[in-house]
Image (cartoon, helix red, strand yellow):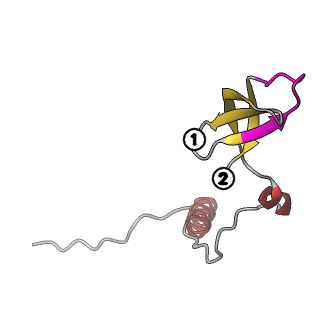
Amino acid sequence: MRLVKWVGTRYSKASRVKVACYVALCFVALCLAITEVSAAGRTYKSPKDEEKPEYEICRLKELLREEEGNSCVYSRQSGGREVVIKIDDSVICQAQFRCKKE
């Protein structure tokens, strides 16, 4: 029986450099791809956003005529409390307006 000794393939110096560069590039790419973020995410919120009230539509429900003056009664879009606005006799109630949300 004959024993065969495997010596391996011999590469030229230029091809060994190319393989080494390719392996190093793959290692760097792998290190960059496997990164863990340790900082908490934050969402920017302007201080002015907290001051802005939210609005909804208030629609005219009825006009109350009284001796002291007229009152316009508006119902809220969300169904909350009614909005009552006192007006003069000569003024007409507007059909709807934007009122502050409760």
The residue carrying mark 1 is 78
Q: Are marks 1 and 2 in contact (CB under 8 Å)?
A: yes
Q: Is residue 58 above or below residue 7?
A: above
Q: Which residue is drawn at 60% across and 63% down?
A: 29
The residue carrying mark 2 is 102
In terms of secondary structure, what is the magenta stretch mainly?
loop
Q: Residue 43 carries which label?
A: none
Q: How crowded is mark 2: few (under 14 residues within 10 Å), some or many (20 or more)?
A: few
| Residue 24 on the magenta segment | no
Q: How crowded is mark 1: few (under 14 residues within 10 Å), some or many (20 or more)?
A: few
Q: In this view, does 19 lie to the left or right of 43?
A: left
Mark 1 belongs to which amino acid?
Ser
Residue 55 location in percent, x, y?
72, 43
Which is nearer the eye, 51 or 37? 51
Part of the protein shown in magenta: 84-94
Residue 25 location in percent, x, y?
62, 63
In the displayed orientation, state which residue is furthest to the bottom: 38
Q: Is residue 56 above or below residue 20?
A: above
Q: Residue at x 63, y 64 (%)?
A: 21
In the displayed orientation, state which residue is furthest to the front: 67
Which is nearer the eye, 34 or 9? 34
Q: In which quarter of the image is the N terminus?
A: bottom left
Q: Earlier along the polypeptide chain: callout 1 or callout 2?
A: 1
Residue 75 location in percent, x, y?
63, 35
What kind of element bears circle 2?
Answer: loop
Mark 2 belongs to which amino acid?
Glu
What kind of element bears circle 1?
Answer: loop
Q: Which residue is drawn at 80% across and 53% down?
A: 52
**Distance of mark 1 from mark 2, alpha carbons?**
9 Å
